[in-house]
């Protein structure tokens, strides 16, 4: 990539992913070097990087959803904390018959 292509790619990335922090890019490039987004066949250009970022974005969103679900589950009452002072509908019907 020549300097113009690099600048153009950076502008596209900043436009498409303005919410990314430097840590996101660090993790993205680390994962890209490890081959998480596919093999490189002799070229790295703006299109390849944008495709990889789209895959990373899906991965990032999925991880964020999983963390949010875990956090929400922490606030769910446990089965033991269930209110056991009531009766079931079947028990109510039996009580009503008596």
Image (tube, rainbow, N blue to C red):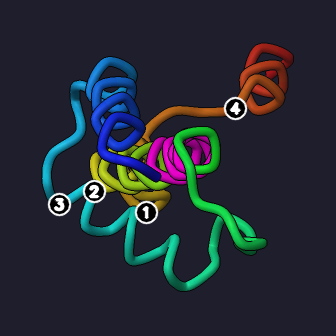
Residue 23, numbered circle: 3
List x then y, in percent, for residue 3: 30, 45
Q: Which residue is mark 4?
A: 88
- Residue at (63%, 79%) from the top-left corner? 35
- Residue at (43%, 40%) from the top-left corner? 85
Q: Answer whether labels 2 and 3 touch (C-beta < 8 Å).
A: yes
Can you tell which quarter of the image residue 10 is in? top left
List x then y, in percent, for residue 27: 32, 68
Q: Which residue is mark 2?
A: 25
Give SS at disc 3.
Answer: helix
From the viewer's perspective, is the residue at label 3 or at label 1 nearer?
3
Earlier sequence position, callout 3 versus callout 4: 3
**For the residue carrying disc 1, how many other residues have a C-alpha within 10 Å: few (<14), some (14-19), or many (20+)?**
few
* The C terminus sits in image quarter: top right
Give SS at disc 1.
Answer: helix
Residue 80, numbered circle: 1
Separation of marks 3 and 1 at Cα, in angstroms: 41 Å
Q: Is residue 85 left or right of residue 17?
A: right
**For the residue carrying disc 4, how many other residues have a C-alpha within 10 Å: few (<14), some (14-19), or many (20+)?**
few
Which stretch did the figure color magenta? 49-62
Give SS at disc 2.
Answer: helix
Separation of marks 2 and 3 at Cα, in angstroms: 5 Å
- Residue at (40%, 48%) from the top-left corner? 2
Residue 8 shown in magenta: no
Nearest the viewer among 21 and 43 is 43
List x then y, in percent, for residue 75: 28, 47
Earlier sequence position, callout 3 versus callout 1: 3
Q: Answer whether labels 1 and 4 touch (C-beta < 8 Å).
A: no
């Amino acid at each position: 990539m020549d300097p113009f292509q690099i600048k153009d790619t950076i502008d596209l990335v900043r436009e498409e992913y303005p919410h990314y922090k430097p840590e996101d890019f660090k993790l993205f490039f680390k994962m890209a070097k490890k081959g998480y987004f596919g093999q490189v066949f002799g070229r790295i250009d703006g299109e390849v990087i944008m495709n990889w970022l789209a895959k990373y974005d899906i991965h990032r969103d999925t991880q964020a959803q999983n963390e949010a679900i875990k956090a929400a589950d922490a606030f769910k009452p446990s089965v033991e904390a269930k209110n056991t002072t009531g009766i079931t509908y079947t028990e109510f019907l039996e009580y009503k018959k008596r």
